[in-house]
Amino acid sequence: MTDASPAPLFDTKVVVVLGDDLAPWQELNVTAFLMTGIATSAPDLVGEPYRDGDGTTYLPMLRQPVMVMTADAETLARARAKAAARDDVALALYTRELFTTSHDAANRAAVAAVAAADLDLVGVALRGPRNAVDRITKGARFHV
């Protein structure tokens, strides 16, 4: 049986923008890491646990859809800068250097070693007002 209630309209939007030069395994890795940042950015983002018909409980997930897009390096950098300049947009990032690190402290050190304008971005994730996120991600295209 399916729920026939209309889909809720969210006042925020969640978007992951990936670099257009990544291998498939890198796209998946970057998306997974970026979404952990978004999922922890606000307490109301995660819904209730799932339960199947047999009573097995599963972990809760985000309550709203996630759009996955791709962009070139210039568009990624521009999106990062625009999002970072806003107080109402949550921003997560993944740099190329993080493919070579092996733990969380090394990841943070790799990002801290580079000025914002010089980050070699391979992905960003944003959550914010729908129209703001649309403007920030202008030039990115839906992932195929």
Image (tube, grey):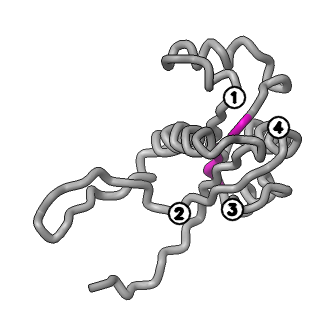
Query: Magenta span covers which residues?
Result: 122-128
144 within the magenta span:
no
Q: Determine the secondary structure under disc 4.
A: helix
Residue position for label 1? 95
Distance of label 4 from label 3 (alpha carbons): 21 Å
Q: Amino acid at mark 1?
A: Thr
Residue position for label 2? 65
Q: Determine the secondary structure under disc 2.
A: loop
Mark whose residue sits in front, 1 or 3: 3
Which badge, 4 or 1, comes first in the chain's sequence?
Answer: 4
The 10 Å Cα crowd at callout 2, few under 14, some 14 to 19, many 20 or more, is few
Q: Amino acid at mark 4?
A: Ala
Kindly indicate the quadrant of the structure image that contains residue 123. top right
Distance of label 1 from label 3 (alpha carbons): 22 Å
Q: Main secondary structure of the magenta part?
A: strand
Q: Position of residue 47 (x, y in %)?
A: 36, 57
Residue position for label 3? 144
Q: Residue at x 80, y 18 (%)?
A: 115
Q: Amino acid at mark 3?
A: Val
Q: Position of residue 88 (x, y in %)?
A: 66, 46
Residue position for label 4? 77
Mark whose residue sits in front, 2 or 1: 1
